[in-house]
Amino acid sequence: MKQRRFSAEQILLEFNSRSKLSELISRFVNLKPRGKQFVGKCPFHNEKTPSFNVNDEKGLFYCFGCKVGGNVISFLQKYNNFSFLESIKYLSDFLGVDFHNDKQFVDDKYRKKLEILSEANELFKHSLTKNTFAQKYLFERGILPGSVNVFQIGYCPDDQTLINYFKKKKNISVEELIEADLLIKNKNDNFFGRFRDRITFPIFNYQDKIVGFGGRTINNSKIKYINSQESEIFKKSEILFGLTQNINQIRESKEIILVEGYLDVISLHQRNIKCCLSPMGTTLSVNQLTKLWNLCDIPFICFDGDNAGRSASKNISEKILEFLEPGKSFKFINLPDLEDPDSFFKKNKISDFDNLKKDSVDLSDLIWEIIIGSFNEFTPELLAKVDETIKLYSNKIKNKAVSSEYFKYLKDKKNKFLWEMNVIKQKEPLLNFSKKVEENINEKLVIVYAIFEIDIFISMIEEVSKLNFSSSNLDKIRNDTIEVVTNDSSSVDHKKKYLKNKYSQIFNSLNRLYETHLKNLENIEKINFFKQIINNLKLPDLSNEKEILKKKILECTNTTEQNKLINQYDKLISEIKLIKKKNLE
Ligand SMILES: [Zn+2]
């Protein structure tokens, strides 16, 4: 590997373009914002009132008490007693950058492009105020004027306006605009505006400098969204959209919710959830990961509730493992099927979102779900494979302490899982659904509902819990499923998966029953069918009750009392008749 050596100046430039001094120092010193600066109690001398200042713009700190000051490297050297090289190593970890191999370093050309983009943003903001069609579009999309301000949303005018503006204002040429990715040159040497006639969303780097734009069409262009192209200044893997706007809230609440796109960030910001960031997609780079953990120990990930979003969460969770450190992790918020944050809030309240947050899944549990979800059967051979997989996942974690905790945790999960499975197996040796399907069919169907139609099951949970089951095996499972679904500490989605795992031994038989009896029914038919099943199960009890009543009536000596009982008896008879009649239908 070719070694490159960088001067302290280059590394400082790089640090200041990717991070803020206050962010690094706040790992060691409790800093509070004061104007554009940060102040705290000096770590280099004893003091009661804070006189230690951090200036992010200059990348310098200074203490008015003991007169110690310097840049990020001198801070690390002084505070941690690091050598120069140790400080560089620390910085490369902090930034998630390899200083020996990273090719792109800040230079004049880089600065010039930043300047052009910042100027373009001014033009876009101004153009929006002149374009009622674009304003109307934003209004119809539910983007409020406040957000237009905070997120500096604009509108990109036609090419000539753009070119003239730059020519007149800064004497910037077409070539330079192409260089800055505002104009694109095609094969025939013609050029056109990348964001022409689009709503523009400026994208800021960690240093609050505009490094690119997102553009949303307002005139039915086939390409709805476009972003600036990857370049030495626009690196998607080093951007967290929303950081510039939400950083203060994030610092204060120490909470981050990672969402997929920039419109999610804006939409949640409008609902006063000002701690959302977007990695501009569903992948997470080491750089973004480091940044997130610098700001918050356990960020939430809240991707869309579709297959893409869910599998992205899984991919991220596997990737994060490698970098886990003590105290650092992630939690995963499960949005209901097919909802994204925006659509969720259109139908729900903030408190519903808080509940989702409470139900969020720990990284370790998600990893367990990934592991166990890849097995359908649990023969001894496959159980050994589960062990291997657990080892594989724990070994991904570089940090030894976390790795060994994960190993223990996942093993524990497996043992618990097996124990529960064995309880079912031992106590229910006759539990073979494939044979004698007709036996206890109603009771079995109740279990089928618990596993496959959990919402309907929950909606009649009281009725279900009152039933008497004739099979003690099935009765145990019924009670167990009730306990699981009424447990408030996990999401419905989680419960489904849990039950599916737990009853994996009989899952195939349950699934067959589901396919033959339920699969093709409309939802309302499923509900009615479930009611019927419950009624059928009530029949033996009702007949029993009927006999008891009969006896009471015969023994009764008080006429009023007797009439009351007869009344009850009649009601019972008609109820039984009704259930029987429905069964014939
Ligand atoms: Zn001091």
Image (cartoon, rainbow, N blue to C red):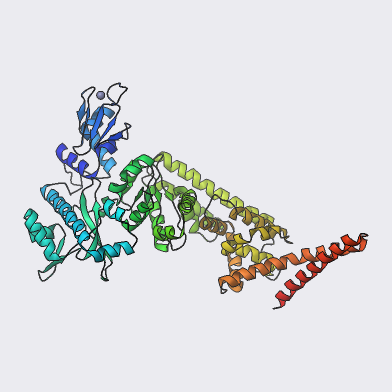
Q: Does residue 191 appear left or right of residue 284 in this picture?
A: left
Residue 258 x, y percent position in the rendering? 37, 51
Q: Nearer the viewer, residue 349 or 537?
A: 349
Q: Position of residue 235 (x, y in %)?
A: 23, 53
Quarter of the rendering containing residue 202: bottom left
Which of the 4 quarters of the picture holds residue 76?
top left
Instruction: State the residue in front, 32 or 161.
Output: 161
**Side (left or right) of 515 relative to 196:** right
Q: Residue at x 80, y 70 (%)?
A: 573
Report the side of 371 relative to 172 (left or right): right
The picture places residue 232, in percent across and down from the top left corner, at 18, 53
Residue 31 appears in which quarter of the rendering?
top left
Residue 566, placed above or below residue 390: below
Q: Nearer the viewer, residue 56 or 472?
A: 56
Q: Is residue 172 visible?
A: no
Residue that appears at 62% across and 56% down = 481
- Quadrant in the picture for the C terminus: bottom right
Q: Residue at x 26, y 54 (%)?
A: 236
Is residue 37 in view from this perspective?
Answer: yes
**Number of callouts:** 0
Image spot of residue 399 (x, y percent): 38, 41
Nearer the observer, 59 or 170:
170
Image side of residue 35 versus residue 512, left or right: left
Where ligand 1 lies, by quadrant? top left
